[in-house]
Image (tube, rainbow, N blue to C red):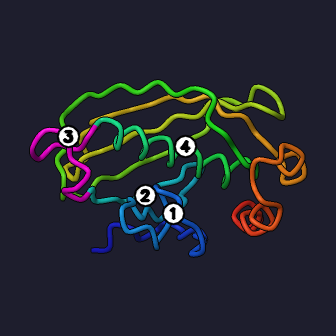
Amino acid sequence: MNPRAGYKPLLNLENHKCFGCSPINPSGLRMKFYSKDESVFSWVTVSEHLCGWENLVHGGIITAILDEIMSRTALYILKKFIMTKEIHVQFLKPVLIETELMAKGSVIQVNHDREAIMEGFLFTEKKQLCAKATGTFALFSPSSLKKKAVINHSRIDDLARLINE
């Protein structure tokens, strides 16, 4: 049985080097995203080079996965660009390298047109919750992000494909 049956694959750009989602970053996580109902999902296997102690995933990598799933959720559900303002992670169980994990992101609340609170969950292959996070994210339209001058304008236009899918 296909574990992703019933999930809609989301667009992923191939011309960037994001640690979380780039398919061409040789050191990255190469996350792919799927939607179902009002949540976004990703299945990811963390490579050995990203371990902490021996065969455990480094806590910073777990945080990156949760940040990435919450960010992609904001892109897809809220149709806004985001920047993480704050993230709080709870590490509940050890996470092993080289095992498939499932990340899930959802919107908790939209405070106003420029800020939202998201939640992220990370599950083991046996569906045990191993980490969870809440994050506050600044929200931007493509035009407001261009005014910030932190990303090249042509890159913003390219990324806008993610919020227009």
The CA span between labels 2 and 3 is 22 Å
Mark 4 element type: helix
Q: Which residue is mark 3?
A: 52
Q: Is residue 28 magenta?
A: no
> Quick check: is 50 in the magenta stretch?
yes
Residue 9 badge: none
Element assignment for label 1 = strand
State how far apart marks 4 and 2 are (Cα). 11 Å
Quadrant for residue 63, please give it. Answer: top left
Q: Quadrant of the C terminus?
A: bottom right
Q: What residue appears at the point 90 percent right and 52 percent down from the top-left corner? A: 143
**Rounded to the nearest whole Å, what is the CA distance between mark 4 and mark 3?**
23 Å
For the residues bearing labels 1 and 2, Cβ distance under 8 angstroms: yes
Label 4 sits on residue: 70
Q: Which amino acid lies under the numbered mark 1 shown in the image of this protein?
A: Tyr
Q: Position of residue 76 (x, y in %)?
A: 66, 55
Q: Position of residue 56 (x, y in %)?
A: 16, 43
The amino acid pointed to by label 2 is Ser
Q: Foreground residue, 113 or 159?
A: 159
Q: CA distance from mark 4 to mark 1?
A: 13 Å
- Contact between marks 2 and 3 (CB within 8 A): the answer is no
